[in-house]
Image (tube, rainbow, N blue to C red):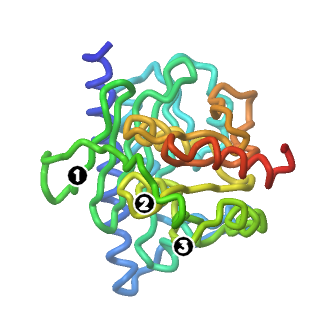
Amino acid sequence: MNGEQDHLLEVARRAARSGAEEIRDIYQQYLSGGSIDIRDKAVNDPVTAADMAANRIITHTLREAFPDHAILTEEEPDTWGETGHEWVWMIDPLDGTRDFIKANGEFVTMVGVTHYAEPTIGVVIEPATGLELCASKGLGAYKNFLSDGEKSSKLTAPQDPDLTGLRIAISRSHRDSKVDELIRLLDVKREISSGSVGRKMALVINGEADLYVHPARGTKLWDTCACEVIASEAGLVFLSGTGEPIRYHRPAGDMENDYGLLVCSPAIADKVVWATRKVWGLE
């Protein structure tokens, strides 16, 4: 399957890069005073022209290359019942819309695909910096900057966190009350706030944080699909807050990860899973 995976990854990177480039261009115009057409698609859930433009570009690229594959994207609710197909693309064209609006640069484009409900390909790009993380199941994870062309380095996450000085990546926009209890249970010494699921995962991969935990509802399948492949291939543990794998084959409309997620080194996984289960009232 390696040849097929190579093609899938090449198309995924092309789609994600095209979407990220569109977001970057709109972002630059926004920084110069341009409009981004902000509106609410639900309560406290904004969407901008950048979200929609990137979504159109990414889905068009994928549909041209793989007309028989299903596409599930955050910006098209009528696609949210597509998880039962052999191949399902799961897309968040702009993860961190609030951070895009705040103009802090902390947002990413995420493109992933499942094969029989198993995350297989993942690409995460930070438009503001050009950072690209990508992975193919069983074939490793890689990092590069778009300005460097195709030059890339293999991703291997640190495996020996300092248990006396744990650092946690937490959401800048969605801090749940469970976070404080989790920090107490794990005796975390430093909090690192950031926008975007993909960006916080990257902090753990790059050794800037020891764990990322989202101990609340709110993340969806398009937040985790691409990230799970990259984190796993980089040597990290990526699970739900109950310590179980995230399920990608769901009933129609069921997109939410009910028990959140966690990302960490295998060396501290048991401790982190214990703590997350405890804050959920499962221990």
Q: Which sits earlier in the primary sequence, circle 1 or circle 2?
A: 1
Q: Residue at x 45, y 59 (%)?
A: 199
Q: Is residue 95 left or right of residue 275?
A: left
- Quadrant housing the N terminus: top left
Q: Is residue 223 visible?
A: no
Alpha-carbon span between mark 1 and mark 3: 27 Å
Q: Residue at x 37, y 69 (%)?
A: 26
Where residue 59 sits: x, y (%)?
Answer: 44, 40
Instruction: Give the residue pinned by disc 3.
Output: 190
Q: Residue at x 34, y 77 (%)?
A: 29
Secondary-structure class at tag 2? helix
Observer-nearest of 271 and 51 = 271
Where residue 105 sits: x, y (%)?
Answer: 40, 72
- Nearer the observer: mark 1 or 3; the answer is 3
Q: Residue at x 39, y 35 (%)?
A: 233
Instruction: Give the residue pinned by disc 1.
Output: 144
The kind of residue on which mark 2 rests is: Leu
The kind of residue on which mark 1 rests is: Asn
Secondary-structure class at tag 3? strand
Instruction: Give the residue pinned by disc 2.
Output: 203
Alpha-carbon span between mark 1 and mark 2: 15 Å
Q: Is residue 115 left or right of residue 172?
A: left
